[in-house]
Amino acid sequence: MVRMRASGGQQEVAAISDAVAVERTLAGEREAYRVLVERHSAYVYRLAYRMTGNREDAEEVVQEAFLRAYQKLQQFAGNANFATWIYRIAANYAIDRLRQRKSEDSRREQPQRVAEGEPEADPLGDVKDAAPSPERLAGSAQLAAKMKDALDTLTPAERTAIVMRHWDGCGIEEIAAVLRSNTSAAKNTVFRAVQKLRLALKPFVEPRGAARAVGTES
Amino acid sequence: MKHATEEELFAYRQGDSKERQALAAHVKECAECQAELARLEHVFTALDAMPVPDPGPDYAARVWRQIAPRLPEKRSRWWQAFVLPQRLAVAGAVALLIIAAFLTGRISVNKETGSENAGLGAGKVRERVLVVAVGEHLGKSEMVLVELSNAQPASGQKLINIAAEQRRAENLVAENRLFRQTALEGGDQAIASTLDELERVLLDVANSPEEVTPAQFESIQKRIAEHGILLKVRVVRQELQTAETGRKSQPAQTDSKAKERNKV
C-alpha cells in the first residue's frame, strides 16, 4: 500500500483553512483553535486599539473576543467568514467596554462638576488645548496625539463607526449591525464622528479662516 | 447651484451620494467646494497619522498562551458533528449500508465457502465491507472534485453557482468523517491520512458560498490542485480495488491448496 504523507504535527495544523480549523475545534481538537487565534489576533488587536485607544484595553478586548468566540463556536454558521465573525465579536465587546468606561468616567467626574457648578459640557469642548499653531504641531507625532485626544471625545458609537468605516472599510450594514441600529442611523453616526473630529482638529489641519459657510450660493 | 453641504461632500467622498454625478460636475467647476473637500480629506489624513503600536512579533503566540488555560474543555468529540440533523441522516444511511453489507457479506461467505471457511473472521468481513464502502465514497468524492477542477467559467461571468457541488460535498464530509474514524480505529493510517486530507478539501467546498466569483472559484480549484488530493484519492481507490479483486480470487487458491494438501 502506498504510504501517504503523515498527517498531524504543528506545521500541518498551521496550514489548515479557517473552516477546517473551526470544524476540528468543534470536534474537540483544541490545538486547531490555536490556528485561528494566531492567524487573526493581530488584525483584531488593531481594531481593538483604535477603538479603545490604549494597549492594555486593546489586549483585553482581543483575549475576550477569542474566549467568547470559542464559547459560541457551535453557533458559528460555518458559511460566514471567521475573520468577519471574530471582528464583529471584538467590535461588540469593545463598544460595550467603551460605554462602561464612559459611564465610569462620568460617575467620577459628576460630583466635581456639581461642586464647581459647571454646565453640561459640549462633547467637543472636551478636546484639550486646541490652540497651538500649525507650525508647532507640524510633526505627525503631535498630530497623532491630537487625533488620539479628538477620538476620545467621540461617543462609543461614533468611535466604533469611524474606526470600522475608515480603517477597516466596513459597509454601513455591517456598522449598523454592530451598533444595533438601522443603516440610516449608522450613516449619520459616521458623519457625526467626522464632523466632531474635523472641528477638534481644525486648528491643526486647516489653515486659519479656511472654513466656509456651506450651502451658500456660489 | 448652491455649494454642497459638508454632509453632501462627505457622502460624495464615501461614494454614498445619490447625486454623485451632479455633485461631481459641481465640484469640478467650484473652487470653493474643491477646497472644502480637501479640508475634509485632511481629517482622514490625520486619522491615518494615528499609529497602532506594534504588539510585538510574538503577540499571536502570547494571546494563545493567555487564553488557552481559560478555554473550557469542549465535550464534543468527532461524532458530535453528526448531531446536526442533516448529517445525522447521512450518517444513519451510511451506518445502515454498512450493517446491511456486513450481514450480506456474512451470509454469502457462509454459503460460498461452507464450513471449511467458517474460520473467516467477522473482522475480515468488516474490513471487506469497509474497503467496498470507502472505495465507493472515494469515487463519489473524486467526481465532485473533478467536476470542480475541470469547470471553466465563461468569460465575463460574474458569479458561478456551485450549490449542487456544495451540497454533495457537505454530504460527503459526513460520510468521510465516519470512514476516517473507522480507518483510524482499524489502524489503517494510510487510508485515514488520505481521508483526512480529502475532508479538508471537501469542507472548503462545503463551506464556500453558493455563488462564487471567478477569483473565489479559482482559489477553490487551486486548493484542490495544491495538495494533489485527486491523485491520492485515485491511488488509494485503485489499491482498494486491487485488494478487493485479490480477495475475491483467494477462495479459488484456497481450494487448490486444499486439494494439494489432500494429495500429500
Image: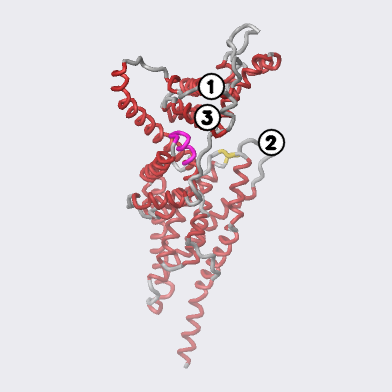
- Give the distance between the C-alpha atoms of the residues marked 2 and 3, in whole angstroms: 31 Å
The kind of secondary structure element at disc 1 is: helix
Residue B167 higher or lower than B1, as above or below? below
Amino acid type of the residue tagged 1 in the rendering = Arg
Q: Which residue is mark 1?
A: A198
Q: Is residue A133 left or right of residue B25?
A: left
Secondary structure under the numbered disc 3 in the rendered image: helix
Residue at the location (52% across, 61% down)?
B194
**Residues beneath discs 2 and 3 located on the same chain:** no
Magenta span: A45-53
User: Vertical placement of B196 versus A88: above or below?
Assistant: below
| Amino acid of disc 3 | Arg
Residue A168 visible, this orientation: no
Q: Position of residue A42 (x, y in %)?
A: 49, 44
Q: Amino acid at mark 2?
A: Gly
- Relative to A181, A213 lies left or right: right
* Nearer to me, A86 or A211: A211
Which residue in the protein does label 2 denote? B156
B259, B171: nearer the viewer: B171
Does A48 lie within the magenta span?
yes
The residue that disc 3 covers is A165
Q: Colour scheme used in the picture?
A: secondary structure
Mark 3 — on which chain does it sit? A
- Label 1 – label 3 distance at C-alpha: 16 Å
